Every structure is written in C-alpha cells, then in structure tokens.
Image (cartoon, grey):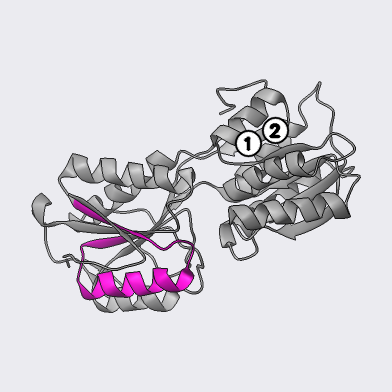
C-alpha cells in the first residue's frame, strides 16, 4: 500500500545494534512499514527515486508512505520525528539540509528507527547511505570534455548549490580534476542555484550577464542544468556556450541532441530507491548492510547517447 503526504504527516511500525539502534527479530512482510521523506515531487529525479522505492516495497510486500517536503528542510525534520514517534520500520531520506536533519535523525535513533540516506551524506547518523561517488564522477565528466576531437573549453562558469553537501563535492571534484588534468581551464564565475529550478534559472542568467566570455557552464544538479538551458534561451549569449553537468530530463536530453549539452552524469535513481529498500530488508533480517552503497553513474554525451560506463 502506498500513501503520499504533501507537507503533512502520517502513521506506521519496528526494532542488532548500531550505536543506539537495536534490531528486534525478523518481521513478517505485511508488518513492515517504510517511510520515504522526499525533497520534492516537482523533480523527475526525485520521482524516479520514489519509483524505485515503491518497486522494492511492492516486491517485498512492504507498506510505503511518502512525505513530500516541497523543498522545506523544516518540514523534513518534522516528518522524520513524526515517523519515528509512530515507530515505522525504517525511514528513507533524500535530505535537503544534511546538517539540519541531524537532530531529527537522533530522535529516530531514540525510537529505534533506522534511517537510510539516499543521494545524501549525513555523517555518523545513518545506518547506510546510497548514491554515486560524486568526486570520481565529476572527474569522469571532465574526462568526457577532454576527449580528442572536441573543442576544449577554457572559461568555465559554475552553477552550484551551496546548501547541498553532495553538490559541493561535485563542484570540488570537478575543480580538483581541472587543476590536475586541464590547467588551461579556469573558472570565470560561480553562482548558487540553491537546487531549485526558478532560482537556478535566475542564477544562470546572472552568470551569463556577469561573465559574457564563458565557453561552458558546469551545473551540479538537475535544477541547475535545466535552469541553465532555459537561461540560454531567455538570455542568449553573444557566443556559443555549452553545458555539462548532472542528471537527465527531457530538456537535458534535447540539449544533448542539439549539441548544447556536451556531457551529463546520469544517476540510476530507480536503482538507488530499490537499493535503499534492499538495505532495509537486510537490516531487518539481521544481515550485513554496508554503510556506503555505491550506485555508479553513466556519462552520456552526444557521441555516446547510451553512455560511457
């Protein structure tokens, strides 16, 4: 059974030992209630994670409840605490603010409810975290831009999300790779898109105005990618500006076909969701659960539309 809650809270069931969390024996499938605390339903990226979680729960006969925080960190923390008090079997979390949810996760621990992070790193608080190797994948994106036969960009603008720890890793990973592999490239400007589409588009327009000599925009997430593509249409630069970054959407796919997007890291978000449910299943059945569960990304380019593994 699936229930979806938009900025309001709900009901559920639990109980080895992580510090502060103990397992209480093998549950019956029908008694397992998983809560997914999502970032937003307005992004296909997060909707695909939900789809993967739903598939995993249906396969195992688990009940699933989904909370849509609508990009509100406070709403996420409130949801985690409420689910913990209702003693759901486990909480899956796509965290907006990895620092702001720490107290709420501590509350879940006091109620013996394990929390698993998806596409987020909440150091020392979760039983597992699922996602890509952000630093290595950022370096692979740069490698794709440096392939023989391509015109190599020299002036880079970056649209990041300073409130997102993983997107900060993608930013620093790309910069570190630039210093090692492409010292002729330099950053002409950085803007904070806040991982919100409207904000990212405005930030991209500001970046294009402030740095008219850009060759390439590197975007650290889907909202930044789509926002940059929109900005290139609404505020067209005097010279050709290409795009590289993260995730896939109809807009990004069209950018690849049109040759505007040179490379994007496509995360297997459905598989992330499924892996999170599998981790819960192993935890509840007293089986080992690795803390870091890596789901590799695929680099897609116009030359390799099916990806470079």
Instruction: Let me know if residue 204 appears in the view.
Output: yes
Badge number at residue 165 = none
Q: Is residue 99 magenta?
A: no
User: In the image, residue 255 lies at what x, y percent?
Assistant: 66, 31
Cα gap from disc 2 to disc 1, whole angstroms: 7 Å
Residue drawn at point x = 64 percent, y = 49 percent: 224
Q: Which residue is rendered at x = 30% and y = 62% of the image?
A: 91
Q: Quadrant of the C terminus?
A: top right
Where does label 1 land, which residue? 264
Residue in the picture at 45% in, 61% down: 70
263 versus 54 height, above or below: above
Residue at image point 15% right, 56% down = 32
Q: Is 185 left or right of 119, judged from the image as shown?
A: right
Disc 2 + disc 1, Cβ < 8 Å: yes
Which class describes the residues within 10 Å of circle 2: few (<14), some (14-19), or many (20+)? many
Give percent across and percent down for residue 272: 40, 45
The image quadrant that residue 269 belongs to is top left
Element at label 2 = strand
Residue 299 found in image quarter: top right
Question: Range of the magenta residues?
Answer: 63-91
The crowding category of the residue bearing disc 1, from other C-alpha atoms within 10 Å (few below 14, some 14 to 19, many at least 20), is: many
In the image, which is nearer the foreground, mark 2 or mark 1? 2
Residue that label 2 marks: 261
Query: Image height check: is 182 above or below 304?
Result: below
């Amino acid at each position: 059974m699936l229930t979806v809650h938009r900025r309001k809270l709900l009901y559920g069931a639990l109980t080895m030992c992580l510090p502060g969390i103990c397992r209480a024996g093998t549950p019956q499938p029908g008694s397992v209630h998983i809560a997914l605390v999502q970032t937003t339903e307005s992004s296909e990226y997060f909707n695909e994670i939900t789809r993967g979680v739903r598939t995993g729960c249906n396969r195992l006969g688990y009940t699933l409840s989904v909370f849509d925080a609508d990009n509100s960190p406070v709403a996420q923390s409130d949801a985690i605490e409420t689910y913990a008090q209702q003693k759901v079997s486990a909480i899956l979390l796509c965290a907006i603010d990895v620092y702001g949810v720490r107290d709420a996760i501590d509350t879940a621990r006091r109620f013996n409810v394990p929390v698993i992070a998806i596409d987020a790193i909440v150091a020392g608080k979760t039983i597992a975290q699922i996602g890509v190797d952000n630093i290595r994948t950022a370096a692979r994106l740069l490698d794709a831009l440096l392939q023989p036969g391509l015109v190599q960009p020299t002036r880079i603008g970056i649209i990041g999300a300073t409130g997102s720890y993983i997107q900060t890793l993608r930013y620093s990973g790309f910069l570190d790779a630039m210093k090692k592999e492409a010292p002729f490239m330099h950053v002409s400007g950085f803007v904070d898109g806040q991982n919100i589409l409207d904000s990212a588009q405005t930030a991209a327009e500001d970046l294009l105005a402030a740095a008219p000599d850009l060759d390439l925009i590197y975007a650290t997430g889907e909202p930044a990618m789509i926002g940059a593509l929109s900005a290139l249409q609404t505020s067209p630069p005097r010279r050709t500006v290409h795009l590289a970054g993260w995730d896939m959407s109809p807009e990004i796919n069209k950018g690849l076909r049109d040759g505007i997007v040179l490379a994007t890291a496509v995360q297997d978000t459905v598989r992330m969701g499924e892996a999170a449910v599998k981790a819960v299943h192993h935890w509840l059945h007293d089986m080992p659960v690795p803390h870091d569960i890596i789901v590799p990304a695929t680099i897609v380019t116009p030359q390799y539309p099916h990806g470079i593994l």
